[in-house]
Amino acid sequence: MDKILFVAQTECDGLLGKASLEALAAAKTLAGQLNAELAVGLVGADVKAAADAVAGCGAAAFYGVSGAEYATARYATDAAALAALCTAAGANIVIGAATSRMSRVLPGVAARLGGRSDTGVTALNVQDGKLMATRWYYRQRMFAELTRQERPWCLSLSSGCVAPYEGAAGSADVTAVTPELPATGLRTEVTSMICPSAEEQTIRPDAALLFVAGAGWTKKQADGVPHLTEAEQLILGFLGKMQASLGTSKSLVDLSGEGQQVMSFLTHMHQVGQTGSTPRHAKGLATCCHGEEPHTVGWRFIGERRAINLDANCGWAQGKADVLYVAVAFDVMRKVLEMMP
Ligand SMILES: Cc1cc2nc3c(=O)[nH]c(=O)nc-3n(C[C@H](O)[C@H](O)[C@H](O)COP(=O)(O)OP(=O)(O)OC[C@H]3O[C@@H](n4cnc5c(N)ncnc54)[C@H](O)[C@@H]3O)c2cc1C
């Protein structure tokens, strides 16, 4: 019988984040399909509250590594904790969320246990009694369905692919597990966490809308001069009201690297595309962005796509957008802001 272990690190509030709850939902569904036993393995300062919150998930056992040294991300402690959880559970399939903390460590855990790892998986299915994982390759241009003989098979699931687990809380009986930490001691000391405030944070993976600002916002407009200040006001005004996530094109972030005056709130982290990110949002609005292939490949998982561009022959018009507004983005966004409450 397969033994599936769902693994997660707890968030600052001691509970599980949305991405981890999605991975738990996927692990639970898979356990049903494979007729396998499900177990939960948690890492954090104190994992009891997180375990209690998902007590009704149907897991046969709960394992936990708790302690101040496991509160934040650090390779040595996370790898040792997850490897100990897998061993304690006797798991041959290990499923976590593809968060930055988990993605960093799960392949190393597989290596320690003599298993294999696949990262950023988008679906888990069963064919002929075998687990099949779906994964995109070549910057989301093609996908493969793959299976493996080697065990344990450690998989991290990309966020936004399944609905998060929702179930009754309760009281979970957590078996405490003690990892074997490196004999050399812990050479990395976590001193503090510096997080941007909610207002400064413009990358919002859970937002309903992705707003993309392209290089056109910085170009000379009909009156022969650029209008950078107004561009910033319109973009930030819309983001604030809509609580949309902000993306950008490579051209716009590269301008800042070349020392040109550009929008201060745009970083390389915002770049969407082949050499940028592949976000998942229900809707997307591209403004002043040409919609070239290396950019739009990052829109693979955006549901409804709209674009505003002066050029009726821009890339968005070549089958990349559902709706293209051929218009001056300044005028459109000014009007949109007026209409928003
Ligand atoms: C290997 C490789 C990888 C790449 N990876 C990426 C990537 O990951 N992401 C990415 O974005 N790009 C990537 N690129 C670059 C990509 O090919 C384009 O150069 C880039 O996306 C163009 O950015 P842009 O559309 O913002 O700028 P531009 O091409 O300069 O387009 C600006 C647009 O703004 C419009 N515009 C101007 N003023 C207004 C206005 N007032 N109202 C409405 N529209 C207006 C113009 O009509 C124009 O279409 C890659 C290229 C290569 C070769």
Image (cartoon, rainbow, N blue to C red):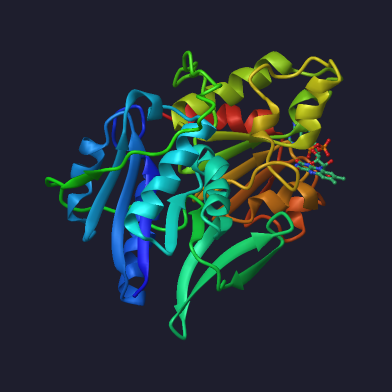
The answer to whether 147 is drawn above or below residue 258 in the figure is below
Q: Where on the picture, by quarter, is residue 222?
A: top right
- Residue 221 appears left or right of 123: right
- In percent of width and height, residue 66 lies at 30, 33
Q: Nearer the viewer, residue 38 or 110?
A: 110
| Quadrant of the rendered image holding ligand 1 | top right
Q: Residue furthest left?
A: 171
Question: Is the residue 207 above or below the residue 152 in the image?
Answer: above
Q: Residue at x 54, y 54 (%)?
A: 110
Q: Position of residue 156 (x, y in %)?
A: 50, 53
Q: Residue at x 48, y 62 (%)?
A: 152
Image point 49% across, 42% down: which residue?
102
Q: Is residue 212 visible?
A: yes
- Quadrant of the rendering where the C terminus is positioned: top left
On the picture, is 308 further left or further right than 196? right
Identify the image quadrant of residue 267.
top right
Tell which residue pokes out farthest to the front in this image: 183
User: x, y (%) of residue 57?
Assistant: 23, 57
User: Where in the figure is residue 339, as x and y percent of width and height?
Assistant: 47, 31
Decide if residue 77 is on the left or right side of residue 175: right
So how many labels did they put on this image? 0
Q: Is residue 166 left or right of residue 262?
A: left
Query: Which residue is located at x 25 percent, y 40 percent?
Result: 50
Q: Quadrant of the N terminus?
A: bottom left
Q: Please say whether residue 206 is visible from this viewpoint.
A: no
